[in-house]
C-alpha cells in the first residue's frame, strides 16, 4: 500500500506515523488468521480475496492468498513471505499529500471507529484506507478513485478469524 500510495520509501522523513507497529501486527496475526475481503471493481463481478497467515515466527509470516468467485471457483493459493516490518511499512503515507483522522465506519464487522488516511496522488487519483485500531494489520476497507473521481477498486473486510487446520 505505502509505495503504491505515494512512493513512501523515498520519503521516510516525511511519512505519517503508521497506525500499528510491527510488533502490534505480529501480536494480532497468529498462524491461521484468515481475512476475507469483498473486492469490487467496475470491470468485473465482485469476488472474495482470502489471506491466511501461516508459519508465523518472530520475524514474519508466510501468507497464502487466493480468490473465490460467486460461482464457487477458487484460484490456486499463492504463497509469499513478508516480515512484520514490511507489513507495517505498507501503511506509510506521505505527510504532505495525506489527510488523516478518526471516523466511524459501518462495515460487515460492525460499526468501527477507524483511523482514515486519504492520499491524493500527483496524478489526481485518491486512495482512502480505514484501519480499525482494535485489529492491527491490514485496513478494514480501502478504495482507489481515478483522477476523474470514478471508483477503480473498493475492498471491504467481511470476516477476520483464526482458522486452524
Image (cartoon, rainbow, N blue to C red):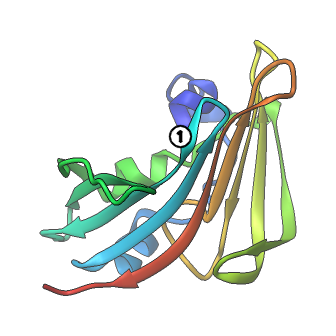
Looking at the image, which residue is at 45% across and 57% down? 70
**Quadrant of the snapshot with the C terminus:** bottom left
Question: Taking 144 as reference, is 68 left or right?
Answer: left
Looking at the image, which residue is at 53% across and 40% down? 1
Q: Position of residue 144 (x, y in %)?
A: 70, 36
Question: Taking 105 as reference, is 162 left or right?
Answer: left
74 or 59, which lies in front? Answer: 74
37 or 63, which lies in front? Answer: 37
Name which quarter of the figure residue 4 lies in: top right
Q: SS class of the residue under badge 1?
A: loop
Q: Which residue is mark 1?
A: 1
Report the number of numbered marks: 1
The residue sitting at the front extreme is 71
88 or 149, which lies in front? Answer: 149
Q: Position of residue 18 (x, y in %)?
A: 61, 55
Query: Label 1: few (<14), some or many (≥20) within 10 Å?
Result: some
60 or 52, which lies in front? Answer: 52
Position above or below: 56 against 119: below
Question: Taking 50 as reference, is 97 left or right?
Answer: right
Looking at the image, which residue is at 24% across and 79% down? 32
Looking at the image, which residue is at 64% across and 81% down? 109
Q: Position of residue 156 (x, y in %)?
A: 62, 60
Position above or below: 38 against 110: above
The residue sitting at the top extreme is 123
Amino acid at each position: 500500500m505505502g509505495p503504491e500510495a505515494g512512493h513512501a520509501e523515498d520519503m521516510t522523513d516525511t511519512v505519517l506515523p503508521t497506525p500499528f507497529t510491527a510488533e502490534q501486527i505480529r501480536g494480532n496475526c497468529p498462524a491461521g488468521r484468515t481475512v476475507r475481503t469483498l473486492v469490487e471493481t467496475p470491470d468485473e463481478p465482485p469476488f472474495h480475496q482470502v489471506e491466511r497467515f501461516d508459519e508465523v515466527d518472530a520475524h514474519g509470516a508466510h501468507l497464502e492468498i487466493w480468490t473465490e468467485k460467486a460461482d464457487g471457483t477458487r484460484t490456486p493459493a499463492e504463497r509469499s513471505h513478508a516480515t512484520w516490518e514490511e507489513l507495517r511499512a505498507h501503511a506509510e503515507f506521505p505527510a504532505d499529500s495525506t489527510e488523516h483522522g478518526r471516523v466511524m465506519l459501518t462495515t460487515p464487522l460492525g460499526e468501527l471507529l477507524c483511523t482514515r488516511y486519504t492520499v491524493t496522488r500527483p496524478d489526481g487519483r485518491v486512495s482512502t484506507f480505514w484501519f480499525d485500531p482494535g485489529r492491527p494489520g491490514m485496513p478494514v476497507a480501502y478504495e482507489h478513485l481515478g483522477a476523474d473521481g470514478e471508483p477503480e477498486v473498493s475492498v471491504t473486510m467481511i470476516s477476520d478469524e483464526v482458522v486452524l487446520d
